[in-house]
Image: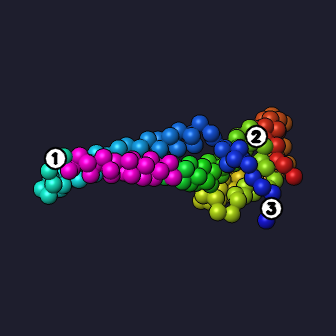
Amino acid sequence: MNNKKRSIKHYLILPSYQLRLVLFMSIVVLVGSIIHIVFLNYVTTRNLADSFSQTQIEQIWDILRPAITVTNALSFVILTLFLIIVTVLVTHKLIGPMLKVTGHINKINSGTLPQNELRLREGDEGQPLCDAVNKLQDSMRQHYVELKELKSLIKNEEASAKLDEILSQVNIEE
């Protein structure tokens, strides 16, 4: 295993997507915190009204409000930091393999069949997709070999030239 330290840039593979997701989750937490404050205020005021006078309720609320505000603000900051870390790590495990598979498919699409199979890091998501790409690559390689064998059997110059043209469009790495 590689013991090099990784920078945050290493984990930000598609920063625009990852940061939008973090922003969305932070807004959800902020809205949840506001709803919590409003609900707590409503329930507290309603329940205290049964036992205390309006003046006493206002005094109690003046004492509790800073504690509630600070606790909610601190909870919001901690949850947001946690969401940032989780989002970056989870999306790194999802987006990294997707980009690697896309690059491999683009290479095949450009006419180059890579020598090596596509491999993902341990713990990355997308192994079924990786396996399917490897099967496709193997199948294409087999078809290419069969076409080369067929070319050697063809005696017709025109057909052989056409097959040469098709085969020249594919580059198999060795």
The x, y position of residue 94, in whole percent, is 59, 52
Return the mark for residue 3.
3
Return the mark for residue 63.
none
Residue 104 in the image: above or below residue 158 = below
Q: Residues within 10 Å of mark 3 (few under 14, many from 20)?
A: few
Q: Residue at x 57, y 40 (%)?
A: 19
Q: CA distance from mark 2 to mark 1?
A: 80 Å
Residue closer to the observer: 55 or 162:
55
> Magenta part of the protein: which range?
56-78
Q: Which residue is mark 2?
A: 111
Q: How is the image coloured?
A: rainbow
Quadrant (top left/top right/bottom left/bottom right) for the N terminus: bottom right
Q: In the rendered structure, which amino acid carries the disc numbered 2?
A: Gly
Left/right of residue 6 with respect to residue 75 in the rendered view: right
Q: Are marks 1 and 3 in contact (CB under 8 Å)?
A: no
Magenta residue check for 69:
yes
- Which of marks 1 and 2 precedes in the sequence? 1
The x, y position of residue 128, in whole percent, is 59, 59
Quarter holding residue 131: bottom right
Overall secondary structure of the magenta section: helix
Q: Which residue is mark 1?
A: 54
- Which of marks 3 and 1 precedes in the sequence? 3
Q: In the rendered structure, which amino acid carries the disc numbered 1?
A: Gln
Q: Residue at x 38, y 47 (%)?
A: 66
Q: Residue at x 30, y 46 (%)?
A: 62
